[in-house]
Amino acid sequence: MFETSLIILAGAYNIGFGIFHLYFPKLFHWDRTMPRMDPMNRGVFLALHWMLMLVFVMVGGALLLGAGGPETSRVLLVGGAVFWVVRAGLQPVLWPFQSSFAYKMFAIFLLGFALHVAARFAS
């Protein structure tokens, strides 16, 4: 039961990040910053953003639904752990810790890593 709860939490975490990305345009003032990008880079950026959202929702949904059985869930959990620890490692490199927001996001990314590792080893 505990392992199932951790897998459900990991799935919900990923779906939550997909939903959180819906707020990026407002949060990061894309109405002001996007027009300054050349059309090709803007298109690539937006395509990657939408595809990342899709991946978050798909991986989260697969974990929630148990798609593919326990072995597939284990692979998704390991992949999720790697994704979130790499994302946490990129935080201080790409966004120096100059605000409390950067620290909070770093902690949230580490939480995602820990959640996926815990769910993987509990299953």
Image: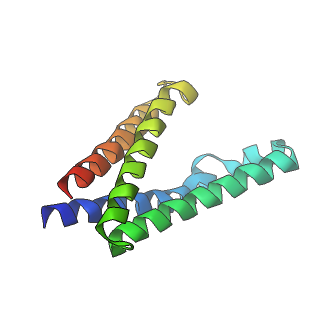
Provide residue 76's location: percent of width, then percent of height. 40, 57
In this view, the residue in front, 34 or 47, is 47
In this view, the residue in front, 73 or 6, is 73
Residue 31 horizontal side relative to residue 89, left or right: right
Vertical placement of 48 versus 69: above or below?
above
Provide residue 58's location: percent of width, then percent of height. 49, 67
- Specify the quadrant of the image occupied by residue 107: top left
Farthest residue toward the right? Answer: 39
Vertical placement of 6 versus 91: above or below?
below
Provide residue 69's location: percent of width, then percent of height. 32, 71
Vertical placement of 35 versus 56: above or below?
above
In this view, the residue in front, 48 or 76, is 76
Which quadrant holds the C terminus? bottom left
Q: How many marks?
A: 0
Residue at figure coordinates x 25%, y 54% from the top left: 119
- Specify the quadrant of the image occupied by residue 1: bottom left
In this view, the residue in front, 97 or 62, is 62
Residue at figure coordinates x 22%, y 50% from the top left: 121
Residue at figure coordinates x 33%, y 72% from the top left: 66
Residue 39 horizontal side relative to residue 107, left or right: right
Residue at figure coordinates x 58%, y 56% from the top left: 52
Provide residue 111's location: percent of width, then percent of height. 31, 44
